[in-house]
Image (cartoon, coloured by chain):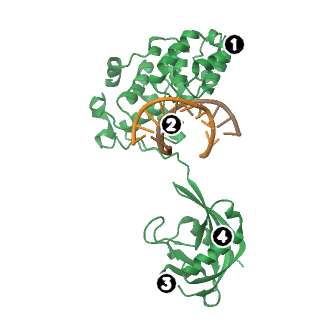
Chain colours: A green, B orange, C brown
Amino acid sequence: MELLKWYQKEQRDLPWRRSRDPYHIWVSEIMLQQTRVDTVIPYFNRFVDRFPSLQELAAAPEDEVLKHWEGLGYYSRARNLQTAVREVVEKYGSQVPSGKKEISGLKGVGPYTAGAILSIAYNQPEPAVDGNVMRVLSRYFCLEDDIARPSTRISMEGLAQELIPAGEAADFNQALMELGAMVCTPKSPTCSECPVTAMCLGRQQGREKELPLKTKAKKARPVFRFAALVEGTGANAGKVLVRQRPDTGLLAKMWELPHIEVADADEWEIMSTGKAKLEEAALEDGVRLRVTEQVVGEAQHIFTHLVWNIRVLAATATEETYVADRTSYAWVGPEQFESYVWPNVFRKLLTEYFIHAINE
DNA sequence: AACGCGGGGAT
DNA sequence: ATCCCAGCGTT
């Protein structure tokens, strides 16, 4: 395969590639978690110099192990490594286990590291899927799965395993990662230097730069709101006052219960604040409301960037002059309800309300 | 599923 | 100065 030929020619000369000692491979893989190659090299050399074998690491005081990790970060990696090494010395006669189950049971060894050790040290046809590999595979096969999802890693492992040429697990897995690190880089991949550029679906479709797809881990900002469920009287009996959103922006032109935002979660606990703010906001639109402090519903609407937490207060309207925009408010009953376009959260609230109201 | 771990590089 | 990176253990 082109990739293997490329790897044999272009691979970097790295200290851990000069050793076939499973323990050295193991140490390097732990160090390389979340840490770039250039940073790891001096640490790896010092570490195996001081702890050349499993036994010596097992026997060393923890302080000294941590001292050799100082500056690498993620110190639990070092502590877990020593714990696991001690287990190997005691349980496996100082031989790094070559069974998937055994090795996966060691502290600090997850799916990636287990696959890396088994394939690199023992040439077993096990996938070793890290961020590099997911990026390369996403582009090569033009996969649109969100690589932030655990299920995507699982399916990529299946794919990566199928791709391993017979007897070439060690080189193939390393070649895949090397390609991701050197050529198929996150920002600007140098496709001109890629050995498989001709077969790369992502490249063919000119989409190599937009892959892999990954949802932002950034968590949605919570916001806190009060909504008014305004029950109609007289001619509007059995109906509820609703409002249309502006033509542009979030949820453009969709219908909703009148609602306002409060500063934070604490203010959201105080119903009198919600009542006051709702009445004030409605009045600016020419609608005089009498809002109660009775909570008739609660709902959450999750966007990618924010989360609405909505508490619904019962209310009635005492006067409607609609000084603002006449068309942005409407009374809606169960019959007209379906013909309006709602964000899901208000559809649910109103459906619940109408079902409840009809049953009474 | 969400969070914490810790440095370094990119922006 | 802030964002992003990315395996694993814990909760």
Which residue lies at the image location 72% right of the left edge and 73% below the top edge?
A293
Q: Earlier in the sequence, mark 3 or mark 2?
A: 2
Nearer-N-terminus badge (1/4): 1
| In the image: residue A11, left or right of residue A355 | left
Are the residues under badges 1 and 4 in a single subunit? yes
- The mark that comes first in sequence, 1 or 2, is 1
Residue wearing tag 3: A326
Q: Are marks 3 and 1 on the same chain?
A: yes
Please check whether the numbered discs 4 and 3 fall on a single chain: yes
C-alpha distance separating marks 2 and 4: 41 Å
Up the image or down, A185 lies above or below A218; here it is: above
Residue A187 versus residue A98 in the image, above or below:
below
Q: Secondary structure at mark 2?
A: helix
* Front tag of 1 and 4: 4
- The amino acid pointed to by label 2 is Arg
Residue A339 screen position, x and y as percent: 50, 76
Q: Position of residue A153 (x, y in %)?
A: 50, 36
| Lower position in the chain sequence, tag 2 or tag 4 | 2
The CA distance from mark 3 to mark 2 is 53 Å
- On the picture, is B4 further left or further right than A41? right
Residue corresponding to mark 4: A312
Chain containing mark 1:
A
Tag 3: amino acid: Arg
From the viewer's perspective, is the residue at label 3 or at label 1 nearer?
A: 3
Alpha-carbon neighbours of circle 3 within 10 Å: few (<14), some, or many (≥20)?
few
Give residue A153's mark.
2
- Quadrant housing residue A236: bottom right
Q: How far apart are labels 3 and 1 at the CA level?
A: 80 Å
Q: Foreground mark, 3 or 2?
A: 3
Residue underneath mark 1: A90
Say which of A167 and A81 sits in front: A81
